[in-house]
Amino acid sequence: MDTFFSKLALSNEGRFRLGRHALFWLVCWIFMGFIYGFMSITEKQGTYILLSYFEAVLFMPQHMILSYGIIYFILPRYIIREKYWPGITAILGLILLAAFMSPLTVKFIITPMRLSMGIPPKPWDGIFYSLMAGLRGSMTVAGFAVAIKLVKMWYLKKVDNERLEKVKLRAELELLKGQLHPHFMFNTLNSIYSLALKKSDYTSEAILRLSNLMRFMLTECNNSTIELIKEVEVLNNYIELEKTRFGRRLDITINITGELQNRIIPPLLLMPFLENSFKHGVNEMTEQAWISLDLDVSNPNLRFKLINGKPSEHCGAKDSFLVGLVNVQRRLQLLYPNAHELRITEDSDTFVVVLVIQLDKLKLPDAS
């Protein structure tokens, strides 16, 4: 039913256009016939009502000329093109044309017809009153018709803008995700390169873990969302990969609680925080490095807290540090608008990330 009425109101298909125009003029005819049928109460009220409906048909052409003239000629040719003065002049001309059609209709059709039926002319059947009545009636009907047309144009423009905005957001999300993948791979390869330089026995194991991570990116990351438990598995795989690199120099605590099943999240949304904690925290510390990761899911919120130690003087590349965080901040803004809270704080020797997401408020832009 909703589809039928939406097509009736918006579709450009011939039968629906004809249907909504016919419906509009039918409503106008019923309204005008009813109003003018009770302008005077007499013993022949039924006759007057029938006559009023017939006369309403005779006045219909002037209403149509004014309405369609504005909608299909003046609006597209002048108003939409911002040619306001020619448009206003044309509208005034059409209004006068429609108004003068009213006394002509009364004089040459309605008055003779009424006299032949034995109905005396009304006091307001004169030229001046007929002109004013035609002016009022035509402007009223045309005003409603033009208002409906403008509302329809506004709605279609709004829908088109929303569609373009969704396409833009989707393209931006794909770009952000595309930037994230090489950044992630670069950091991971750096870790394996460090193991290879040391001729570590864990190099082959690290390469195996990298292949698993690459498989994840090639398969799961093409989707808009993944299961939260898979995202956590990726985090664990990356942590294990880094643990083989740093060995006993790394003290890491992981605490994951709550119900992870049947939850979805955009892929690699949490990974940039973990990457930064290793690259700009653990990697740059000469003393014992440490990381504390807490993840809790309590319906409907996910709370992610990551704390890592860092050197008192940051000696890494600041631009590289910002890439991942700026990327994920923008993704959060697009995917969880007004449904997330991200706090990043640091002091001389610690870096803290606290992220709270309302998982049920995920907003994915449609492809259409």
Image: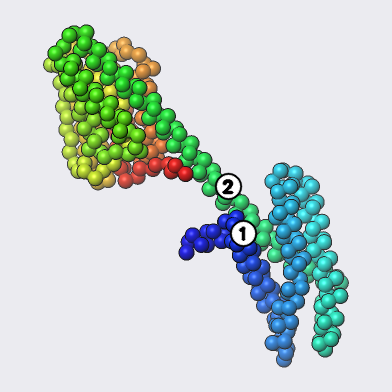
Residue 160, compared with residue 125, is above or below; it is above
Q: Is residue 45 above or below residue 166?
A: below
* Residue 14 circle label: 1
- Neighbour tally class for label 1: few under 14, some 14-19, many 20 plus, Cα within 10 Å: few
Q: Residue at x 21, y 32 (%)?
A: 233
Q: Secondary structure at mark 1?
A: helix
Q: Position of residue 89 (x, y in %)?
A: 80, 51
Q: Are marks 2 and 1 in contact (CB under 8 Å)?
A: no
Residue 352 visible here: no
Q: Nearer the viewer, mark 2 or mark 1?
A: 1
Is 321 situated above or below 367? above
Question: Which residue is painted at 49% across and 60% down in the image?
Answer: 3
Label 2 neighbourhood size at 10 Å, few (<14), some (14-19), many (20+)?
Answer: few
Residue 303, by quadrant, is top left
36 relative to 60, above or below = below
| Residue behind mark 2 | 157
Residue 253 in picture, x, y percent from top left: 16, 27
Tell me the kind of residue under disc 1.
Answer: Gly
**Is label 2 in a helix, a strand or a loop?**
helix
User: Tag count in the figure?
Assistant: 2
Residue under the point 71% across and 78% down: 53
Answer with left or right where residue 140 lies relative to residue 103: left
Query: Mark 2 and mark 1: span between their CA atoms?
Result: 21 Å
Expressed as whole percent of the image width and height from the top left, the position of residue 294 reads 20, 32
Looking at the picture, tell me which residue is in the foreground, 342 or 270: 270
Between 295 and 216, the residue placed more toward the observer is: 216
Image coordinates of residue 362 in percent, x first then y, are 35, 42
Residue type, mark 2 in image? Lys
Q: Is residue 157 visible?
A: yes
